[in-house]
Amino acid sequence: MEIKPYIEKAKNGDQVAFTFLLDFYWNEVYGFMLKRTENETDTEDIVIETFAKAFDKIATYNPDFQFNTWLIAIAKNVHIDLLRKKKSSLFVEITDEEDQQAYNVADSSLSAEDELISQQNLSRLLQFIKELKPNYQEVIQLRYFQEMSYQEIADKIGEPLNNVKIKLLRAKKLLAEIITTR
């Protein structure tokens, strides 16, 4: 498969080309990083940030090198940044009471809003959304239930706009996979 035309289109701001490249290389970058981190949540965060940075800086991509090599190099740098960030926050102390509160927060029972939506024949969709990881649930909820713009979501969760776009794209793709397998 010839990737160069998609890269050129992506350099010109073509969102369809971005989506194609994301889908085409996601598993390769994800698999590479999962071996390094051995943590699915960290890996997903790293890969999302990798693609966001790649799409921000795609104009700097040198076609003399393989595109996947360039993506992997970005992923390695994002991983190093994450490790530095974690190392600096390692010494936060949590009391036993705070730890117990964190365990008590997780509640799988339906809220009043969930029951209302259930009555409107959207309960199945909500159940599928709840199968997504929490960070995907959050962006879906903010975008489609609170009707926030991409920029408002980025501001609220403190992430770059491109990360939000990629998270939403990935969340919609995963949700579609869940729905079609049921």
Image (tube, grey):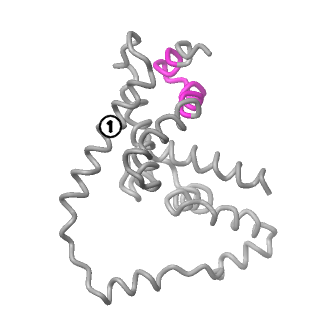
Magenta stretch: dominant SS?
helix
Closest to the observer: 38 or 68?
38
Q: Name the residue under label 1.
A: 76
Q: Please state if 59 lies on the left or on the right of 125 as rendered.
A: left
Can residue 17 be found in the magenta stretch? yes
Count of marks, rendered view: 1
**Residue 153 position in % (x across, y down):** 46, 54
Q: Is mark 1 on a helix, strand or loop?
A: helix
The image quarter in which residue 80 lies: top left
Where residue 94 sits, quadrant-wise, is bottom left
Left or right of 65? Residue 26 is right
The span picked out in magenta is: 7-22
Give the image location of residue 180, x and y in percent: 78, 50
Q: Classify mark 1: residues with Cα within 10 Å, few (<14), some (14-19) or many (20+).
A: some
Q: Residue at x 44, y 44 (%)?
A: 163
User: Any magenta on residue 107?
Assistant: no
Q: Where is residue 58 in the image (x, y as percent from the top left)?
A: 40, 23
Q: Which residue is drawn at 46% across and 86% down?
A: 104
Residue shown at 32% from the left, 84% from the top: 98
Q: Observer-nearest residue: 162 or 81?
A: 81
Question: Please, what is the three-letter code of the amino acid marked with disc 1?
Answer: Lys
Residue at the bottom extreme?
97
- In this view, the residue farthest toward the top is 64
Residue 38 place in picture, x, y as percent: 41, 52
Q: Quadrant where the C terminus lies? A: bottom right
